[in-house]
């Protein structure tokens, strides 16, 4: 029996949430969200992305968000970068941690970033080298690890091989990502059986979307493998339950409710994150999908309505 | 290590879902739903409740639903009954399985059914005796097993003692219920550590609400204890995510998606249940909260929108 996880790490991804919201949020509201997440105890916050504003208008003001942000000591503020140009922009903003994003499916890679997997890894190798030379840490996302919307099943050996290539570049962690939210705990176990035979738990993070409601069960399954780092976005930003393309990240609050209940310390205050999420909600124009936030909003827990 | 669960049993509870919907659904739509659930492979369906129509208007037509229903061989159609009068009405409808509902919290019992726990158990003892004499099987719900909205924590010893008293009446199964949807997997483990030391897995069912998003993770934790029976309602009926009192049952589809993925056979076809849920959705006047149904509706899985 492996030692149970006692301390959890929860990177907060307003970036991933907001970039999938149709309504462009004002820069000031983004800054307020990031500052509130840091106040809540978040120590890893992915603030934005230095990508083309043509492709992701929501991220066009990332430099302004960084410029306006009052940074808190001990908090790692990061940004997504697709290439050397993005890295340069990040460095100009004083960013000390960036993330690159590769895919485990060739078709998804072509459609998402218009590069083959090998081309993207060549780019990210350059980014990692330059970043490290500048004292900037690099995280890598590996998307479609549990299935691809175009190719279907993705062989776990490919996931394992790409994880190794990314770690070889010196990235400190690979976020094994369920891009389309189809992973279930049986699959988490079969993927982690392979990955954990090769990698340490601190080299891996898991990035779940709650599209089919399985994200927390997947986290529970991953904890059996001593994985302790789980991505989330406040309120489940990025997933509108009643709009096309509802593929929201696991909500930070839902994750914290379970980790708190399991006695796994994260240092993040669920009430403060909930307040931060509720504060940004009006700006996105629809109700946040987080179950926990919904329960708080409706005070569901205090009404006896059934046997 | 215990033997893993290979076969799952999924009682379908349109009753619990519908009774918590504000809009009264037409009798014909209820009949169509129950018939569609049987066609989907459901073998246990809780159709309605023989309770006072003053308290639960949605259940006023339960006799008509039973009368209009084309029953399928091999399917157990049940009804909730609060007392001997309810049992008599059920018997008149040819119902061969009923359910009684006790609480593990004194305050909740008083507020929900206006009886002390002991008074309710005396009533249910009479119901069980009469039911068994008439060849009718009895299930028992035990609500607030993971916490009470009025009293807070509920001692697991009380849950265990009441489960034993209910089983002593000859009920075939006690549905250990998280009435307000606050259970998390840590608590599931601590409750089942106690219950499984005393009861066989087939004497227990688990009844989760997905109020805080933890229902599937709770099921995953319960599977470790060889529990194999999990309540659900189609589409997560009964929980409107944006209305006060959002305390929906775990959605059948979300549950099936996970159990299917774990290789646990239920005999129920997820696509057919989804179709049944989508067919009833217009009648309830809001979107169903099931994540899986939402994903199907939005075809979220087929759109590549993120890294």
Image (tube, coloured by chain):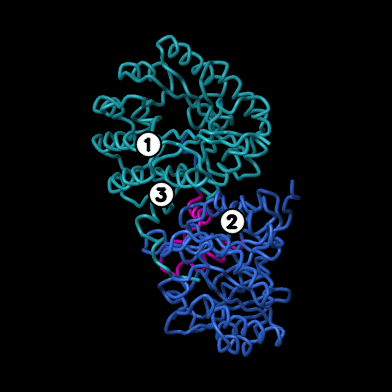
Chain colours: A blue, B cyan
Q: Say if residue B21 shows up in the picture.
A: yes
Observer-side mark, 2 or 3, equals 2
Residue carrying label 2: A191
Residue B25 in the figure: left or right of residue B19 = left
Residue shown at 46%/53% (left/top)? A212
Mark 3 crowd level (few <14, some 14–19, many ≥20, 10 Å Cα):
many
Report in which chain the residue with disc 3 lies: B
In reply to whether residue B47 is colored magenta, the answer given is no
- The total of numbered circles placed on residues is 3
Tell me the SS state at disc 1.
helix
The magenta region covers A272-299
Q: Mark 3 and mark 1: span between their CA atoms? A: 15 Å
Q: Of circles 3 and 1, which is in front?
A: 1
In terms of sequence position, does the residue under pointer 3 or pointer 1 come before the other? 1
Q: Secondary structure at mark 3?
A: loop
State which mark lies toward you, 1 or 2. 2
The residue singled out by tag 1 in the image is B14
- How far across and how far down the image is residue B110, in percent? 53, 29
Classified by dominant secondary structure, the portion drawn in magenta counts as helix
């Amino acid at each position: 029996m492996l030692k149970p996880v006692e301390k959890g790490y929860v990177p907060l991804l307003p970036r991933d949430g907001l970039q999938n919201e149709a309504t462009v949020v004002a820069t000031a509201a983004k800054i307020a969200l990031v500052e509130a997440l840091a106040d809540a105890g978040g120590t890893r916050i992915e603030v934005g992305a230095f990508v083309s504003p043509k492709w992701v208008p929501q991220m066009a003001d990332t430099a302004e968000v960084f410029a306006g942000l009052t940074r808190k000591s001990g908090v790692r503020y990061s940004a997504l970068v697709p290439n050397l140009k993005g890295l340069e922009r990040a460095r100009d903003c004083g960013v000390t941690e960036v993330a690159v994003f590769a895919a485990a499916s060739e078709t998804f890679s072509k459609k998402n970033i218009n590069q083959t997997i090998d081309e993207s890894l060549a780019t990210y190798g350059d980014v990692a080298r330059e970043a490290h030379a500048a004292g900037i840490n690099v995280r890598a996302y590996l998307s479609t690890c549990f299935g691809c919307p175009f190719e279907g099943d993705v062989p776990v050996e490919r996931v394992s091989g790409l994880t190794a290539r990314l770690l070889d570049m010196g990235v400190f962690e690979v976020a094994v990502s369920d891009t389309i939210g189809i992973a279930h705990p049986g699959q988490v176990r079969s993927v982690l059986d392979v990955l954990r035979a090769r990698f340490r738990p601190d080299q891996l993070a898991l990035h779940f979307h709650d599209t089919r409601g399985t994200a927390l069960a997947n986290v529970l399954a991953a904890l059996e493998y001593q994985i302790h780092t789980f991505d989330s976005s406040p309120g489940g930003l990025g997933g509108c339950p009643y709009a096309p393309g509802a593929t929201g990240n696991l909500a930070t609050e839902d994750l914290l409710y379970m980790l708190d209940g399991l006695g796994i310390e994260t240092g993040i205050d669920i009430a403060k994150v909930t307040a931060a999420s509720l504060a940004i909600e009006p700006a996105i124009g629809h109700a946040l999908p987080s179950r926990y936030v919904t329960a708080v909003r409706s005070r569901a827990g205090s009404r006896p309505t059934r046997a």
